[in-house]
Amino acid sequence: MSDASREFECSLNQWMESISSATSIGELEKIRAGLLGKSGAITSEFRALAKLSIEEKKIIGERLNIAKNAIEEAISEQIKKIKRSIIEERLRSEVVDITLPSVSDSFGSLHILTQAMRRIRDHYHARGFLVLDGPEIETDFFNFDALNIPKHHPARQSHDTFYIDGFDDVLLRTHTSCVQIRTMQKTGIPVRMISIGKTYRNDKLDSTHSPMFHQIEGLVVDREGLTIGHLKSELKKFISAFFETEDVAIRLRPSYFPFTEPGVEIDCRYKKEGGRLRITGDGTDWLELGGAGMVHPNVFKHCGIEGPAYGFAFGFGLERLVALRTGISDIRNIYETDVRTLRYLNNIR
């Protein structure tokens, strides 16, 4: 072995020793730059090959390539070793005793929609109502036919409704009224219930619409004694409970729904204070909240209910109620995944 070869081997051993003794990734990066960087020792040796003969280039070039690969592999292995040691040290030093009480001031919370649904469920459970949900994939019968919605109704077209590929009569439910039909078919009457769940419409997501949203719908049916006056009383109780105010004034405007006769739109008085909406009986303006009405006789027929039957039903979009309660103008904020937005909504609820 020539003196030059012995000197290179000695240098290589020193370089490998400095790599194996490095204790930080930053130190290894400095070594890498000193050897393999633009002005590094190995890089300079490669540049010097241009001055050598062909035979010398082959011999020294092969030696340099072997050394370069060995250095890169050694640095890579040392980086892995350092990362492992960092993780092991953290595991030793950051042991958590899960039996100790938490000292964090940043606890998680239920989503604002979940909180609203729970509040509604608690209100109706306390009053003896059934709180139910049903399948989100429904048939034409439960979603349309049983609710007295005729075949030519626009809501049955694909531009309004999501149909399941390969089926002409299977769809994503467009309302939770299907649950009312299933309940009356199963239990008969009398019945007092609400249904809360996801519904689907073929709408583009914007500030007031979503292809998926939640509905709350109520139904009270008995053999006799129920009038539109009872409906109005029930609506005032619900609005009062949801918006946490005893001061509620509502009005019912005539409207058409295939499954009610008569049908009405529900309005309540409100006013704005500090840029936020407040439901109050002395409000100067009216706000539309949802739809309601007395159950159409044809609905009872489709449920197999014979004899006298009287009842009322009402429905609200949950996202709209939450938006009104929190004062937001864009329902897309409700679906926001940014923790800061969700924390803000929870703080103003």
Image (tube, helix red, strand yellow):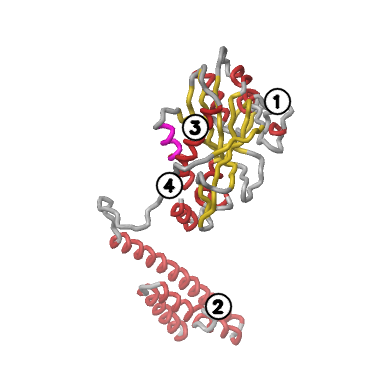
Instruction: Answer above or below: position of 337 versus 314.
Output: below
User: Where does residue 193 sit, x and y in percent of width and height?
Assistant: 48, 28
Q: Position of residue 92 (x, y in %)?
A: 28, 60
Q: Nearer the viewer, mark 3 or mark 4?
A: 3
Q: Nearer the viewer, residue 264 or 297?
A: 264
Q: CA distance from mark 3 to mark 4?
A: 28 Å
For marks 3 and 4 on the same chain, the one whose residue lies earlier in the sequence: 4
Residue at numbered disc 4: 110
As measured in the structure, the alpha-carbon distance from the residue carrying label 4 to the one carrying label 2 is 66 Å
**Mark 1 lies on residue:** 150
Q: CA distance from mark 4 to mark 1?
A: 40 Å
- Above or below, comparing residue 68 to residue 300 in the picture: below
Mark 3 near mark 1, Cβ–Cβ under 8 Å? no
Q: Position of residue 30 (x, y in %)?
A: 44, 78
Q: Are marks 3 and 2 in contact (CB under 8 Å)?
A: no
Chain-order first, disc 3 or disc 1 = 1
Is there CB contact under 8 Å for labels 1 and 2? no
Q: Judge whether residue 164 can be spotted in this image.
A: no
**Secondary structure type for disc 4:** loop
Q: Tell me which label, 1 or 2, sits earlier in the chain.
A: 2
Q: Identify whether 46 is placed above or below 162.
A: below
The residue that disc 2 covers is: 61
Q: State the residue in front, 28 or 328.
A: 328
Describe residue 67's horizontal placement relative to residue 266 as left or right: left
SS state under label 3:
helix
Residue 173 colored magenta? Answer: no
Answer with mark 4 or mark 1, whichever residue precedes in sequence.
4
Residue name at image x 45 percent, y 40 percent? 241
